[in-house]
Image (tube, rainbow, N blue to C red):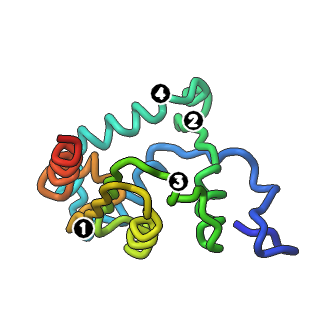
């Protein structure tokens, strides 16, 4: 992701987006599921809905074979900067209650990310961090018994 000449700079030639088809949308979710039978974590109907809803966000999706979605790479720039210790925002300026949830099997965030954010939320009146056992990056799509129920329950409890 970095420039060859300057490893502390994101590759400015990376383009604005990646093109991802159905298999690409599901690849990381599947890879984070610790079972050979992915349907234990992921209801096939939910996976299909996720794919079709995501493809539906790109009006050019059906112009490619197979249909695919353009995904902006801004999140990769953010991750690159975070990996170099460059925060995206100053958490000390947040003055509202904060709930931070992470699936144990999340491929993107790290346990240290939760700790660091919670530590930096010095002006938040309430900070709750939750590591959901067996949950993936897709907590809201995982089967209820593999994270989704706890995810939703934590949100509802936090808001009441």
Viewer-side label of 4, 2: 4
Q: Residue at x 60, y 64 (%)?
A: 87
Q: Residue at x 36, y 65 (%)?
A: 106
Taking the image as drawn, is residue 108 in sight? no
First-in-chain label (1 vs 4): 1
Q: Circle 4 — which element?
A: loop
Q: Is residue 100 left or right of residue 108?
A: left
Give the quadrant of residue 30: bottom left
Viewer-side label of 2, 3: 3
First-in-chain label (4 vs 2): 4
Q: Which residue is mark 1?
A: 36
First-in-chain label (2 vs 3): 2
Disc ID at residue 56:
4
User: Given the current orientation, which residue lies at the most extreme top position?
Assistant: 59
Taking the image as drawn, is residue 111 in sight? yes
Viewer-side label of 1, 2: 1
Q: Circle 3 — which element?
A: helix
Distance Cα–Cα, label 1 vs label 2: 28 Å
Viewer-side label of 4, 3: 3
Q: How many residues crowd mark 3 within 10 Å: few (<14), some (14–19), many (20+)?
A: few
Q: Residue at x 22, y 42 (%)?
A: 159
Q: How many residues crowd mark 2 within 10 Å: few (<14), some (14–19), many (20+)?
A: few
First-in-chain label (4 vs 3): 4
User: Given the current orientation, which residue lies at the most extreme right position?
Assistant: 5
Pick the front one: 93 or 56: 93
Give the quadrant of residue 128: bottom left
Q: Which residue is mark 3?
A: 93
Q: Which residue is mark 2?
A: 65
């Amino acid at each position: 992701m970095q420039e060859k000449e300057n490893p502390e700079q994101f590759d400015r030639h990376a383009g604005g987006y990646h093109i991802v088809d159905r298999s690409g949308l599901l690849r990381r979710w599947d890879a984070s599921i610790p079972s050979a039978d992915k349907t234990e974590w992921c209801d096939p109907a939910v996976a299909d809905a996720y794919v079709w809803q995501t493809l539906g966000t790109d009006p050019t999706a059906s112009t490619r074979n197979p249909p695919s979605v353009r995904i902006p790479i801004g999140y990769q720039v953010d991750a690159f900067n975070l990996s170099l210790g460059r925060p995206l925002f100053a958490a000390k300026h947040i003055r509202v209650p904060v709930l931070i949830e992470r699936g144990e099997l999340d491929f993107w965030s790290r346990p240290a990310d939760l700790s660091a954010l919670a530590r930096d939320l010095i002006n938040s009146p309430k900070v709750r961090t939750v590591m959901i056992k067996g949950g993936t990056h897709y907590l809201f799509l995982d089967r209820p018994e593999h994270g989704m129920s706890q995810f939703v329950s934590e949100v509802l409890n936090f808001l009441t």
